[in-house]
Image: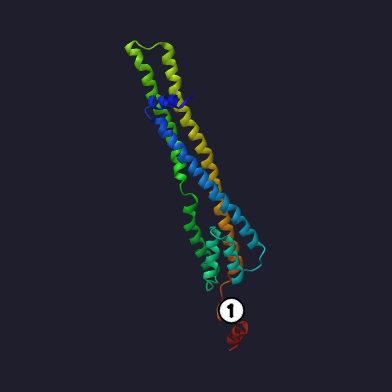
Amino acid sequence: MNLQHVNELAASSGGTLYLMLLLLLITLTVIIERSWFLYRSMSGGRAVNERVETLPRLRNDLLQNEIERAGSLPHATLLKVALSNPEMNERQVLADRLEESILHAIPKFDRSLWILDTAVTLAPLLGLFGTIVGMFNAFSGLGQGSAVPTQVTGGVAEALIATAGGLFIAMLGLVCLNSLNTRVRLLVHQLETLKQMLINRCAHMPMRDNASNHPNMVVARTGT
């Protein structure tokens, strides 16, 4: 199959093969870019969580060291929250601020995945459209009496290439989309785990009132 024959197939499908080729390139670009981003984030984040887990308590110098080692990972954002807010000594306050950082980071994880979702739906439709156009061209010669049966069957077979191409793009996009969604979920779980570890190692229990901290004072008052 030479380039001229490919151009003829694309022309017979109404140009949909060119659109499907462009859709395939976009799909592969998104798959490669998101796979690399999520792999790097998960592998680096796993190392951050393992280091934080071994520490009984996080001091400011340890937090700063972890931030420098985390670099551009999303986990560094949570570490910065714990470092830049030393006055947040209550667990619930720190938990809310860390959860806010996670919510801001999540849209960056599944960015461009909507393109894969669109490709899964659009590719078979484009392939079917190209096949229908190709079959119109294949059967058009019968009405004029100039086509032989072998030419018609050959044209139908070539028209089905568009459908096969659309199904291939859809299957590739579906498998990769499910895989990337799973990685996004695991990355969010990593951040949630890091959040809980930071709360356990950075936050103090909320202060009680003075009376509860000094039981002798309570006894004295009751005695009077």
Q: Is residue 42 left or right of residue 159?
A: right
Looking at the image, residue 174 lies above or below residue 134: below
Whether 32 is drawn above or below 18: the answer is below
Looking at the picture, the colour scheme in use is rainbow
How far across and how far down the image is residue 169, in percent?
48, 34
Q: Is residue 4 left or right of residue 213?
A: left
Q: Residue at x 63, y 57 (%)?
A: 47
Determine the residue located farthest toward the left in the rendered image. 144
> What residue is drawn where x is 37% and y is 17%?
139
Measured along the vertical axis of the image, is residue 54 above or below residue 153? Answer: below
Say which residue appears at 46% left-offset and 39% top-offset: 25
Q: Which residue is mark 1?
A: 212
Residue type at mark 1 is: Ser
| Residue occupying image coordinates x 55% and y 61% | 76
Residue 38 drawn at (x, y percent): 55, 50
Q: Quadrant of the C terminus?
A: bottom right
Depth order, front residue of 53/20: 20
- Image coords of residue 72 (percent x, y): 53, 59
**27 lies above or below 208:** above
Q: Secondary structure at mark 1?
A: helix
Nearer the observer, 210 or 67: 67
Q: Position of residue 88 (x, y in %)?
A: 53, 71
Front-lying residue, 171 or 195: 171
Label 1 neighbour load within 10 Å: few <14, some 14-19, many 20+: few
Q: How many marks?
A: 1
**Depth check, front residue: 199 or 149:** 149
